[in-house]
Image (spheres, rainbow, N blue to C red):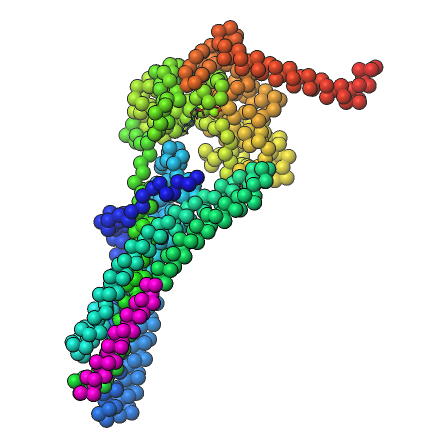
Amino acid sequence: MRMAGKHSHKPRSLPAAWRFIGPIFKRCRWRITAGILALLTVDLCQLVVPRIIKWAVDGLRNHTVDGSQLRNYAALIMLLALTVAVLRFMWRYLILGFSRLLEQDIRDALFHHLLSLDSAFFQRRSPGQLIALATNDLTSVQMACGMGLIAAIDALLMSFAAISCMAYIDLRLTLLAILPFPVLAVTTRILASRLHRHFKRVQEQFSLLTEEARGAINNIRLLKIYTREAAQCAQFDITGRSYIKHSLKVAKIQGVLFPASGFIANISLLIIVFFGGRMVISGTISIGGFVAFISYLFMLTWPMMALGWVSNLFQRGLTSLARIQEVMDERPLLQPVTAGRKIGRPDIISLRHLTFAYPGQERPRLKDINLDIRPGLLGIVGRTGSGKSTLCALLARLYPVEQGQLFINKLDVNDIDLNSCRRLLSFVPQSAALFSTTIARNIAFGAPETGRKEIEAAARAAAIHHEIMAFPKGYETEIGERGVLLSGGQQQRIALARALLLRAPILLIDDALAAVDAEAEAMIMAHIMAYAEENMVIMVTNRLSPLRQARQIAVLDKGRLTALGRHRELIAVSEIYRGIYAHQEFGNNKAELKNSADHLSNPACRRSYAA
Ligand SMILES: Nc1ncnc2c1ncn2[C@@H]1O[C@H](COP(=O)(O)OP(=O)(O)OP(=O)(O)O)[C@@H](O)[C@H]1O
Ligand SMILES: [Mg+2]
C-alpha cells in the first residue's frame, strides 16, 4: 500500500512541539539542569586552557617563568583535563539518559494511544507506517532532544565564549576572523531546508520498506504458492533503492555542509595568520595572545560545524515529531462514554431503522434494519457481501452507530459505557486471529487468570480438547503468530473456545465454523444450543443445518433485512434462503454420493456387499 506520501508532515511550530514534549522536559528538569551545568563547567575549563598557554608562552618569551612555575602550569592543565573528562562523562550520562527516557515516554504514549484508536484508523494506516513511527521517527526525536540539544547549547555557548575571549585579546582581529561566518549561516540555512525535504522522503520510504517486509513475511505461504518470491524481491529492491537514493541525497547535502563549515573556518585561520601575524610583528598583540587567539579559533571550528549538524538534527526531529503528533492527534470515532450508564444482563437488543455506512463512505452497507434479539439462537444468513459481518461489527461496538438506532435493554448504546457494553459480549470474528504464544494462553486471552479446568471445559465445548491433548506439549504447545502449526479448522475452534470461555451473555459468531467438519460442528452446536437457553447467541453462517433449531433466522440481502423466521417458514417465503438451501442440499448430496462411492471402492466394503 503506497499511502505514505498522502500525509503531510510539515514540521509543526515549535510551540506545538513543545506542548507535546514539554511535560517530559519538565519532569526531568533536575537531570537536564545538572547535565547542562556539567557541560558549562567543561566549556569553562576548556576556555581557561588557552589562557594558561598564553601565560606560559609570554612568560617564556619574557623570561619571567622558571621551571617550577612551568610545572605548575602543566599541573593546572592536567587538573583541568581531568575535570573535563569526569564532567564530560556526567553530561553525556545525564543528557543522553534523558533523551532515552523521553523516547520511552513517547513510545509508551504512542502505543497506548494506538490501542485506543479503532478499526477505521487501522484501515487507513498500514502496520509498516506505524512501526516506522515507533522506530525511525522516534530515534530522530530522541537524537534531536539528546545530542541535538546538547550540541546546540554547547555550540552557542562555546562560540559566544570563544568570541568574547578573542575580543578580549583583540577586537579588530576578532571582527576580521568572524567575517566569513554570515556566509556559513546562509549556506546552512539553504542546505538545511533541502535536507528536510529529502529526509521526509527517507522516512516515508522507510515506512514503505517496513510495510513490504512485513506483508511478505506475513503472507509467506501465499508468496510461495503463487511463486512470487522473485517478483517480491524485485519490488523490495525497487523500494530499497528509492530509500537509498533519498538517503544518499541526504548524505550528499550533509557532505557539503561539513566541509563547507571546515573551509570557512580555514579562511578565518588564513585571515588571522595574515593580519594577526602582522600585529605580532608590530607589537599590537603578544605572541602568547596570538597563540591563544588561534586556540580559540580552533574552539570555534566545532560550533561552526555543529551549526549545520544541529540544524539537521532539529529538522529531522521536528519532521519526525510532526509525524508522531499527527497520529497522536487522531481521535477514536467511538469515544468511550466513561460517564455513560453501566449495563447488566441484556434481555433484549433492538435495532430500529439501523442504517450504516463505513466511515468516510457515502454508500450505506446496512439499510433500515428492524430487529429484536432475545436470548436464544439467532441465525444470520445472506449472500457474500450482504452485510453480515458489518452487522456483527456494529453489535460488537467496533464502529459508531447513530443515536436512536441500536438499543440494549431499551437503552441507546451511545449512552452506555463502551467497555461495559463490550464486556457483555464475546465475539468470534470471521478470520481466526491467534497470538504466537501457547494454546492455553490463546484460549484464556480474555481472562488470563482462568484456571486450567475452565480452559479445558471451553476447549471441550469447542470440540478441540482431544486434538490439543494429542500435541506432545498439550495446552502448552506454542503456536506461530498465525497459527501455522494448526489447521484452519483447529484455529477456528481455538478462537471459538476463547469466546466460549468468557461465558458472556451475548455470543457472536461470524461465520467462524466454515472450516470445521460436520462431526465437530454437531458437537459444538449441541453445546451452543444449551448455552442459548439462557444467553443470546448470534450466529452468522451459510451452512443451514446448524440453524434448523434456531429461534429465528434473519436473511440479509444487500444490507437489508429481507426475511425473518424459522427454517421452515423461510423455505416457504424467502427466495434467497431457498437458494442457499438448494445450493447446500446439492452440495450435501454430492458429498453423500462421494462418500458412498469411496465406501464402495474400499475392497473390504466390496467384499461385505458381495457377501
Ligand atoms: N471495513 C470496511 N470498510 C468499508 N467497506 C467495507 C468494510 N468491510 C466491508 N465493507 C463492505 O461492506 C459490504 C458488506 O460487507 P460484509 O463484510 O458485511 O459482508 P458479509 O455479508 O459478511 O460477506 P461474507 O459472507 O463474504 O463474509 C461489502 O460490500 C464490503 O465491500
Ligand atoms: Mg462476513
Q: Is residue 361 magenta?
A: no
Rendering coords of residue 98 (x, y %)? 32, 57
Rendering coords of residue 217 (x, y %)? 52, 43
For this orientation, the residue located farthest to the right is 611
Q: Is residue 280 magenta?
A: yes
Q: Judge whether residue 385 can be spotted in this image.
A: yes
Rendering coords of residue 498 (x, y %)? 50, 31
Secondary structure predominantly adopted by residues drawn in magenta: helix
Image quarter of residue 65 = bottom left
**Residue closest to the eye, 608 or 288:** 288
Residue displayed at 39% across by 51% down: 202
- Left or right position of 294 against 123: left
Q: How many marks?
A: 0
Quadrant for the N terminus in the image: top left
- Left or right position of 492 against 157: right
Residue displayed at 30% across by 83% down: 75
